[in-house]
């Protein structure tokens, strides 16, 4: 029995199991790829953004250059280039508000050299939906050949959890506190940024979840292909254990609940054509998802019903766009 997988076997997606070659599933394929991040980074225990980053780096491979702006992943040890620790491929540290602009210049440089390199942003919602939205929108409009991945944990987590435009209404944050009587929290609804990016008419836009890794892998592969003609945008929903008040061992469970309740639907938009990737005959109540975290422990029935109503409205709109 071969102890290692040959390059030919990897290329054709084969795996040695029980004395014969079998076709790999996505989990097998990921296991066969080299991890581009060392084990020793300092993300919080159970952090699903780390899982997302490792998955992205494995799928996109070593022929890739990253920009990771200030934020959780910029602060856990992946910035730089060191084959022994942190990232094993080049990762730059741009400003919070110029990620896409910097990458556009890097991509142009590689094109001038005749080199085909994946140029990728891995940025939080603060750097994407707030501070960096202007340059991201510009890159999308220009058709810059980039892959932009937003990990959305609904706030500025690296600096102690301040609200962002991606924070859900009524959330407790350090800048939207809640009184002892249960009054307070964020006053505005969450910005529907995946839809904002889809309306830029870019070649590819998709939503992803760490609870559905095979779906994420497929979309990363599509993003690589789409980025040859313009900007590809992936929006990953990553519940934050530390900031939201979630138990580390329920990280993936809460991520899955967000999808199963239609709070964060999985869909993709290819050249303007909408496709919903996960549908449920009986979606779980949004209240079940909201009840799994401390940042919503003050919610009353009326506020929870308002969030449910918005989720239902957006889901109905999405199904119409997808022709369902």
Image (tube, rainbow, N blue to C red):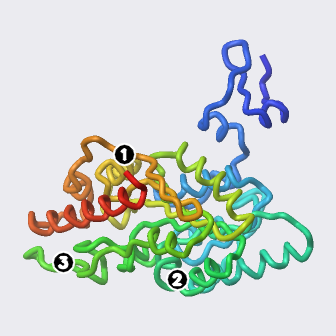
User: Going from the N terminus, do you reach mark 3 or mark 2 first?
Assistant: 2
Nearer to us: label 3 or label 1:
1
Q: Position of residue 60 (x, y in %)?
A: 70, 55
Secondary structure beneath dot 3 equals loop
Give the spatial CA distance, label 1 vs label 2.
30 Å
User: Going from the N terminus, do you reach mark 3 or mark 1 first?
Assistant: 3
Residue 134, quarter of the rendered image: bottom right
Give the spatial CA distance, label 3 vs label 1.
34 Å
At horizontal 44% and vertical 60% (from top left) the residue drawn is 238
Q: Position of residue 210 (x, y in %)?
A: 48, 51
Nearer to us: label 3 or label 2:
2
Q: Which mark is drawn over residue 279? A: 1
Q: Position of residue 280 (x, y in %)?
A: 32, 43
Residue placed most toward the observer, 173 or 111:
111
Residue placed most toward the observer, 240 or 278:
278
At horizontal 35% and vertical 79% (from top left) the residue drawn is 163
Residue placed most toward the observer, 120 or 319:
319
Q: Is residue 228 above or below residue 142?
A: above
Q: Is residue 49 left or right of residue 1?
A: left
At horizontal 71% and vertical 53% (from top left) the residue drawn is 36
Q: What residue is disc 2 on?
A: 133
Q: Residues within 10 Å of mark 3 (few under 14, many from 20)?
A: some
Give the spatial CA distance, label 3 vs label 2.
28 Å
Secondary structure beneath dot 1 equals loop
Q: Is residue 128 left or right of residue 17?
A: left
User: Going from the N terminus, do you reach mark 1 or mark 2 first?
Assistant: 2
Secondary structure beneath dot 2 equals helix
Residue 279, quarter of the rendered image: top left
Residue 228, quarter of the rendered image: bottom right
Q: What residue is disc 3 on?
A: 178
């Amino acid at each position: 029995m071969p102890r290692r997988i040959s390059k030919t076997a990897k290329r054709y997606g084969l795996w040695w199991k029980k004395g014969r070659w079998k076709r790999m599933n996505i989990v097998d394929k990921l296991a066969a790829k080299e991890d581009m991040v060392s084990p020793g980074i300092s993300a919080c225990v159970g952090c699903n953004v780390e899982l997302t980053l490792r998955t992205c780096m494995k799928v996109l491979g070593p022929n890739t250059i990253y920009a990771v702006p200030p934020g959780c992943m910029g602060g856990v040890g992946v910035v730089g280039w060191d084959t022994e620790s942190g990232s094993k491929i080049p990762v730059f540290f741009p400003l919070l508000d110029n990620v896409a602009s910097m990458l556009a210049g890097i991509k142009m440089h590689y094109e001038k050299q005749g080199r085909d390199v994946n140029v990728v942003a891995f940025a939080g919602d603060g750097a994407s939906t707030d501070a960096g939205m202007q340059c991201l929108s510009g890159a999308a409009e220009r058709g810059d050949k980039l892959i932009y991945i937003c990990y959305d944990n609904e706030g500025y987590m690296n600096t102690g959890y301040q609200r962002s435009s991606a924070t859900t209404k009524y959330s407790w944050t350090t800048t939207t506190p809640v009184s002892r009587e249960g009054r307070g929290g964020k006053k505005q609804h969450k910005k529907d940024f995946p839809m904002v990016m889809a309306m830029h008419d870019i070649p590819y836009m998709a939503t992803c979840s760490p609870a559905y890794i095979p779906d994420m892998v497929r979309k990363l592969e599509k993003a690589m292909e789409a980025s040859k003609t313009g900007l590809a945008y992936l929006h990953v929903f990553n519940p934050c254990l530390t900031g939201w008040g979630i138990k580390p061992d329920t990280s993936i469970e809460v991520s899955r609940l967000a999808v199963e309740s239609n709070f964060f639907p999985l869909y993709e938009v290819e050249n303007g054509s909408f496709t919903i990737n996960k549908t449920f005959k009986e979606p779980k109540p949004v209240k079940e998802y909201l009840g799994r975290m401390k940042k919503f422990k003050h919610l009353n029935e009326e506020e929870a019903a308002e969030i449910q109503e918005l989720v239902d409205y957006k889901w109905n709109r999405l199904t119409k766009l997808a022709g369902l």
